[in-house]
Image (tube, grey):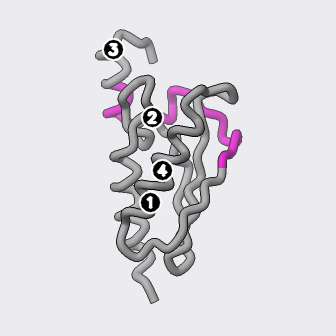
Amino acid sequence: MLDTPRLVNSLWRAMANVQDPEFQVSIVDMGLVVGIDDRDGRVTVTLTFTAMGCPATDMIIEDVRTAGMSVPGVTSVEIEVVWNPIWTSARLTPTGRLAFQEMGIAV
């Protein structure tokens, strides 16, 4: 049996390396990762997006799947896209907020 807390922590670190291609900010710092669940290496990553028509959705989903599969012990990665909670700038981490402000984007 896998050590789920350790695996989930590794997955969060892997997701922090996935960047939104438009803003070059980590999807974790953007608050797009809602949750990560592990069932003996079968992982579900729950994501939200800034808008339903986000043109980077497919690219981000593929990058998330690739990042998840790079973590030792992961046998599959399922992506669940949710719209609740709705994304707002309140989901930004302090690092994400700073990155947006440095780009001149009011948050």
Label pair 3/1, CB-CB below 8 angstroms = no
Cβ atoms at labels 4 and 2 below 8 Å apart: no
- Disc 4 marks a residue whose amino acid type is Val
Alpha carbon separation for disc pair 2 and 1: 18 Å
> In the rendered structure, are the residues bearing label 4 and label 1 in contact, judged by CB atoms less than 8 Å apart?
yes
Mark 3 and 2 residues: CB-CB less than 8 Å, in contact?
no
Residue on which disc 1 sits:
68
- Identified by mark 3, the residue type is Met
Q: Secondary structure at mark 2?
A: loop
Crowd rating for badge 4 (residues with CA inside 10 Å; few <14, some 14–19, many 20+): many
At a point 58% along the width and 46% down the height, the residue shown is 47
Q: Which residues are drawn in magenta? A: 81-98
How many badges with numbers are in the image? 4
Pick the residue in front: 86 or 79: 79
Estimate how packed mark 1 is, as few (under 14), some (14 to 19) or many (20 or more) residues with alpha carbons within 10 Å.
many
Residue at the location (54% across, 55% down)? Answer: 35
